[in-house]
Amino acid sequence: MALDLVSPLEEIISIVAGLEGVHQVYAGIPKGVSKQLVAFVSLGGQAISDKASGGLVERTVRYRVMFGYGVDGIPEDAEVALATIVDRFLVAIYAARQSWAQTPGTFGTIRSVDPSPADDPAYALWPGHEYRLYPITVSVAQRMVA
């Protein structure tokens, strides 16, 4: 397998776009969040390591999946929408992990799905915020012989 950032990005976008309730999906960061449930998927950092003396290299790429909902004065709607979509996404991404494992070399291997970035206070709903965000990190590993 060659290193390929685009294929997993497009596949994750496709998974998110297929979730019931997501109004729009962006590749990269949008200029703003609407009053409907939106998602954006972007590249995060990477870790690259040698796996064997024969030139086997593994790269783990972190993709950021961010769900956003415009609050519009009704924070309960945002929380319920985000709680619902996070559950749907987790079910879909773990199903995709099984599918990717059956077709090795296509996108890479989903190593982890991490919703813990949502613990950061920056993602909490504070008075005056116009939108609520919920981040999830999906780590994908790819290998190649250098």
Image (spheres, grey):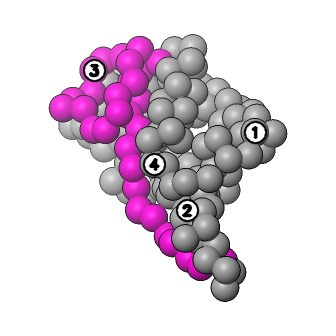
Residue at 64% in and 41% down: 106
Residue at 60% in and 57% down: 142
Residue on which the image places disc 3: 34
Boundaries of the magenta span: 22-51
Q: Within 10 Å of the Cα at label 1, are there few (<14), some (14-19), or many (20+) other Cα atoms?
A: few
Instruction: Pick whichever of labels 1 and 4 is earlier in the sequence.
Output: 4
> Is 47 contained in the magenta span?
yes
Can residue 98 be seen here?
Answer: no
Q: Is residue 31 above or below residue 61?
A: above
Place of residue 63 in the rendered image (x, y in percent of width and height, measured from the top left): 47, 49
Place of residue 55 in the rendered image (x, y in percent of width and height, measured from the top left): 61, 77
What's the distance in space between the residues labelled 2 and 3, CA to CA?
Answer: 32 Å
Residue on which the image places disc 1: 103
Q: Amino acid at mark 3?
A: Ser
Q: Amino acid at mark 1?
A: Thr
Instruction: Pick whichever of labels 4 and 2 is earlier in the sequence.
Output: 4
SS type, badge 3? loop
